[in-house]
Image: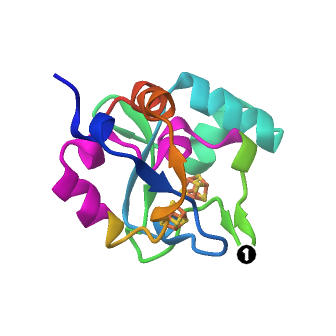
Amino acid sequence: MPKWWEKEPLRFECQPDCFKCCLKPGIIYFDSEDIRNAADYLGISPSELKKTFLTRDDGEWVLEVGGDGAPCSFLTDTGCGIHDGKPKQCQSYPFWRENMDSKSMWKLVGGFCPGIDTGPMIEIGTIKSFLQKFRH
Ligand code: SF4
Ligand code: SF4
């Protein structure tokens, strides 16, 4: 059966100078590919990246955001400081499984993310590839 988002167009465009999702408390998963990409981008080793920025959570490497009210450690005044090396979780926001479960959930996330329901229509194939990319 088609998903609700396959039956109606979805629009999304990340808003300049917003960064709200980089301030929100939570955890960001880094799998081995994410660790390698971010480390390469910063010019450090994967073990240095883990030691400096990440912690273990239930057997996975994660970056904790906002526990002490601080934004993501990689956020700079001009945006993500590891933009081309950012993890799949960030690349695929807001197209996460939990956000796409139902139209009401998508609308709820739209109350937080001002990029939802603006900008160009996102192709179904693109949405599917985001859902494949970040599987939590
Ligand atoms: S909350 Fe939405 S619009 Fe704002 S930075 Fe994140 S994805 Fe972009
Ligand atoms: S890694 Fe970059 S995109 Fe992801 S939360 Fe941190 S600053 Fe934002």
Query: In which quadrant will I find the N terminus?
Result: top left
- 12 left or right of 105 in image: right
> Which segment did they paint magenta?
85-109
Query: Dot 1 lies on which element?
Result: loop
The residue beneath circle 1 is 77
- 7 left or right of 78 in image: left
Majority secondary structure of the magenta segment? helix
**In-front residue for pair 34/68:** 34
| Residue placed furthest toward the right | 43
Q: Position of residue 94 (x, y in %)?
A: 42, 51
The magenta stretch spans residue 6: no
Q: Where 34 falls versus 84 (above or below)?
A: above
At x 56%, y 43%, the residue is 91
At x 53%, y 36%, the residue is 88
Whether residue 44 is visible here, answered yes or no, is: no
**In-front residue for pair 31/118:** 118
The magenta stretch spans residue 88: yes
Q: Position of residue 34 (x, y in %)?
A: 59, 31
At x 46%, y 71%, the residue is 114
